[in-house]
């Protein structure tokens, strides 16, 4: 079997008994293949089309079908071909037979292959005559589709004397209208009937061109008709406008308002410009709709409307007293703020805006409502919780479809007045550092007195600033330290602390119960009076055993639950009236809840700390245990935060450094493992204020001395035993009183905060102030410091010479 070099070509076909010219420019590899074919194979080579370039499928790069070819040059085979190749731009190749490569071998850079000739599928004379007749019948159509030139058609007459195969190959070789994939199918097919079908079914490009031209003309005609109709419609609309006057009915109303009412000049100018743009557009277009919406916002925002504010401090204080029990300091600060605001110059702001902060349910929102009612101002709320997009505050840019102003401008429109009270709730829960911007810092422009005179909303645009300087802004938060510092700096903080049991009793009796009964008055009241009554003992029992909160929100829900269940009983005819007592409360509220309580009996290794969160105060039971094991790292459980873990380590190191003073054997640290646990492990705990409680619990465990359950303590401890100041003393004291503690130990530096503790709490608590932990130890364990409890070897002190 003969072996020839292989030439794998892109976009090049060579059919049997046909000639084709191969370009040689800038292709060194092709020249090497041709030189080897000329020298070693008498000019014979194998031409294979690259199917990857035809189909775009990498797996079909080499398909072993092609043509046996010969270099067609008028020179002797013994002549040196290289000089000729270097001078030629192309070389003629003549196709001989269809072949299939059976074996491949690479020699140097060039692939060589063995091949076998592919014979035509044998057909009998009758079928061959039918195919020839069919070919002749379709030949004019084939020639028209292939678009061969007159010169190319001349060989047909000669070829007709041969077989149909030669003619099909000739047409496939020379026609530029046949695509490469179709040519490859014709070359690879050995069935004459199949090749003839491929040629007959060639697409008629002339018909395709005619169809495309027809469709194009129809589309152009349609567009021209639409353009003509639109222009005609515009002309009709212009005539109608002239006959009816300027603009639509809605635009007319806006124009009348702009003429009659005292809008700022910059608002009028922008409104007129937008109206002119709107009138020049088709009303049903998207842009016209956006402009119309913008004009509506521009005209309907309160630019000049301003109600007269009722500046009466007596009325404000009266309204606050009507709706809120106690809170004397809060009410005084609010009156001071309002008085300063009213006394300031027109162009200046007297003070910062207010921030009411405290646990949930202590009356922040209702205080803001009471102020608005007393001043006769509209009251609107912006909830900042979960806001994570600057556009919520400052609006969207007008280029977006469906864009609208931010919540500030929306609330101003809702208020219908330039002078209103804006209540920003849950400010500490606003989103920060979002990919949509930082809405917390977007509020700076609202809260800063120097900036809010010209508040810029993205929707209205920079040329349309809005004046917020006359708006009273009150914010609310549970934890003010979560508010960004620049924002907090613009606010004057007023603290609303947890309610005491006595305060809750008066709030429930004098405020919440009457409100709930009034809500359901059709059932709860009759001609004789109230059908349902709460005894004082029932209210106190409800507060102590069914609620444990800083505010009164849960208390209000429990009261409403009792009333609702009575209403069901009344409708069913089971009861006509009800007196709520501690004995029948479980019938309506089921069993009392189990809250964190002080221990019933003293236990070794247990101490009671005091905790404070944004939701009020609570007691914090701490437990310490140790067990034999070689010294290792202490273990902390109970969901302790990093700072509280550091407090545990500080307490341990302080005790270890002073173990002799406290009567503790140092070997207990090296031979035992110490575990520190804070009760209620599901609740995260953080902060340094449990330092002295942790220290006391560890000493109790190591000395096996129990601490009284009547004592609670709070204070940060240092490595040298100093007791540092803490926060939230008022809430912690209220929690201690609520939990039944009799004594609390606090840092001496917090002595100034004792006056903030409600009177009824102070009367029932002994408050002990300390500077050093040694004072705590003396108070808890009733012993004087022990020195040298365990013998210590005396060390000789080296003499030190001091040179004068």
Image (cartoon, rainbow, N blue to C red):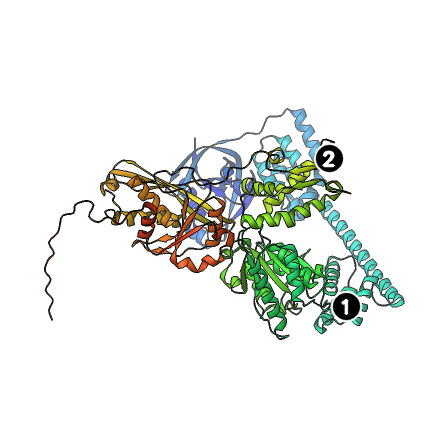
Residue 307, percent from left and from top: 72, 67
Residue 678, percent from left and from top: 40, 42
Q: Is residue 258 above or below residue 18?
A: below
Q: Within the image, what quadrant is residue 168 found in?
A: top right
* Residue 200 in view of the camera: no
Q: Nearer the viewer, residue 549 or 776?
A: 776
The residue beneath circle 2 is 576
Viewer-nearest of discs 2 and 1: 2
Asked whether disc 2 touches disc 1, contact meaning CB atoms under 8 Å apart, the reply is no
The residue beneath circle 1 is 276
Residue count near mark 2 (Cα–Cα under 10 Å), binned few <14, some 14–19, many ≥20: some
**Which element carries disc 2, helix, strand or loop?**
loop
Q: Nearer the viewer, residue 402 or 518?
A: 518
* Residue 164 in view of the camera: yes
Q: Is residue 116 above or below residue 526?
A: above
**Which element carries disc 1, helix, strand or loop?**
helix
Give me the residue at 68% from left, 38% from top: 564
Cα distance in 3D space between marks 2 and 1: 71 Å
């Amino acid at each position: 079997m003969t072996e020839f070099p292989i030439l794998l070509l892109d976009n090049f076909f060579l059919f049997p008994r046909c000639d084709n010219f191969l370009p040689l420019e800038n292709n060194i590899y092709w020249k090497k293949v041709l030189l080897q074919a000329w020298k070693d194979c008498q000019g014979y080579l194998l031409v294979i089309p690259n199917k990857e370039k035809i189909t775009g499928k990498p797996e079909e790069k080499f398909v072993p079908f092609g043509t046996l070819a010969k270099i067609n040059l008028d020179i002797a085979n013994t002549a040196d071909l290289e000089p000729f190749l270097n001078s030629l731009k192309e070389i003629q190749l003549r196709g001989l037979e269809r072949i299939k490569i059976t074996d491949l071998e690479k020699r140097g850079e060039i692939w060589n292959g063995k091949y076998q000739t592919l014979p035509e599928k044998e057909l009998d004379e009758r079928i061959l005559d039918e195919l020839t007749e069919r070919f002749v019948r379709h030949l004019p159509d084939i020639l028209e589709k292939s678009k061969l030139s007159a010169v190319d058609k001349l060989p047909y007459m000669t070829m007709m004397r041969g077989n149909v195969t030669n003619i099909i190959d000739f047409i496939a070789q020379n026609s530029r209208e046949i695509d490469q994939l179709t040519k490859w199918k014709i070359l690879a097919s050995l069935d004459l009937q199949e090749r003839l079908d491929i040629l007959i079914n060639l697409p008629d490009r002339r018909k395709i061109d005619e169809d495309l031209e027809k469709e194009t003309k129809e589309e152009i005609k349609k567009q021209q008709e639409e353009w003509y109709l639109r222009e005609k419609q515009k002309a009709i609309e212009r005539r109608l406008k002239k006959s009816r006057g300027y603009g639509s009915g809605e635009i007319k109303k806006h124009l009348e308002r702009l003429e009659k009412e005292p809008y700022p000049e910059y608002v009028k100018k922008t409104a007129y410009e937008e109206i002119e743009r709107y009138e020049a557009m088709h009303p049903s277009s998207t842009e016209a709709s956006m402009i119309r919406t913008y004009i509506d916002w521009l005209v309907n925002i309160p630019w000049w409307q301003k109600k007269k504010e009722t500046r009466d401090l007596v009325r404000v204080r009266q309204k606050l007293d009507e709706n809120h029990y106690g809170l004397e300091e809060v009410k005084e600060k609010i009156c001071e703020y309002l008085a300063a605001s009213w006394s300031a110059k027109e162009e200046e702001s007297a003070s910062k805006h207010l921030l009411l902060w405290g646990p949930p349910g202590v009356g922040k929102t209702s205080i803001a409502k009471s102020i608005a009612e007393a001043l006769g101002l509209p009251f609107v709320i912006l909830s900042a919780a979960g806001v994570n997009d600057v556009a919520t505050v400052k609006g969207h840019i007008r280029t977006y479809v469906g864009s609208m102003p931010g919540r500030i401008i929306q609330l101003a429109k809702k208020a219908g007045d330039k002078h209103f009270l804006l209540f920003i709730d849950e400010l500490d829960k606003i989103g920060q550092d979002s990919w949509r911007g930082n809405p917390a810092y977007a509020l700076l422009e609202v809260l800063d007195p120097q900036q809010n005179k010209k508040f810029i909303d993205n929707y209205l645009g920079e040329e349309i600033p809005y004046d917020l300087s006359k708006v009273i802004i009150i914010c609310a938060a549970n934890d003010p330290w979560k508010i960004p510092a620049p924002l907090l700096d613009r606010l004057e903080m007023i603290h609303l602390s947890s309610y005491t049991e006595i305060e809750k009793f008066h709030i429930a009796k004098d405020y919440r119960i009457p409100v709930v009964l009034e809500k359901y008055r059709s059932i709860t009241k009759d001609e004789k009076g109230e059908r349902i009554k709460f005894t004082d003992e029932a209210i106190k029992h409800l507060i102590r055993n069914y609620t444990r909160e800083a505010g009164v929100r849960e208390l209000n829900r429990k009261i409403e639950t009792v009333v609702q269940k009575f209403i069901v009983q009344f409708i069913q005819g089971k009861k006509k009236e009800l007196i709520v007592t501690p004995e029948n409360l479980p019938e309506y509220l089921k069993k009392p809840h189990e809250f964190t309580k002080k221990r019933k009996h003293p236990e070794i290794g247990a101490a009671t700390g005091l905790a404070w969160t944004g939701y009020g105060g609570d007691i914090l039971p701490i437990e310490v245990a140790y067990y034999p094991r070689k010294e290792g790292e202490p273990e902390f459980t109970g969901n302790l935060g990093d700072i509280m873990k550091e407090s545990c380590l500080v307490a341990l190191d302080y005790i270890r450094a002073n173990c002799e003073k406290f009567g503790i054997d140092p070997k207990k640290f090296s031979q035992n493992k110490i575990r520190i646990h804070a009760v209620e492990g599901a609740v995260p705990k953080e902060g340094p204020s449990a330092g002295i409680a942790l220290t006391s619990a560890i000493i109790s465990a190591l000395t096996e001395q129990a601490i009284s359950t009547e004592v609670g303590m709070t204070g940060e401890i240092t490595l040298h035993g100093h007791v540092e100041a803490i926060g939230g003393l008022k809430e912690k004291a209220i929690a201690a009183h609520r939990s039944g503690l009799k004594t609390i130990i606090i840092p001496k530096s917090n002595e100034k905060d004792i006056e903030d503790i409600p009177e009824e709490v102070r009367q029932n608590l002994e408050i002990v102030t300390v500077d050093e932990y040694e004072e705590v130890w003396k108070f808890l364990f009733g012993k004087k410091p022990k020195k040298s409890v365990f013998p210590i070897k005396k060390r000789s002190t080296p003499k030190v010479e001091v040179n004068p």
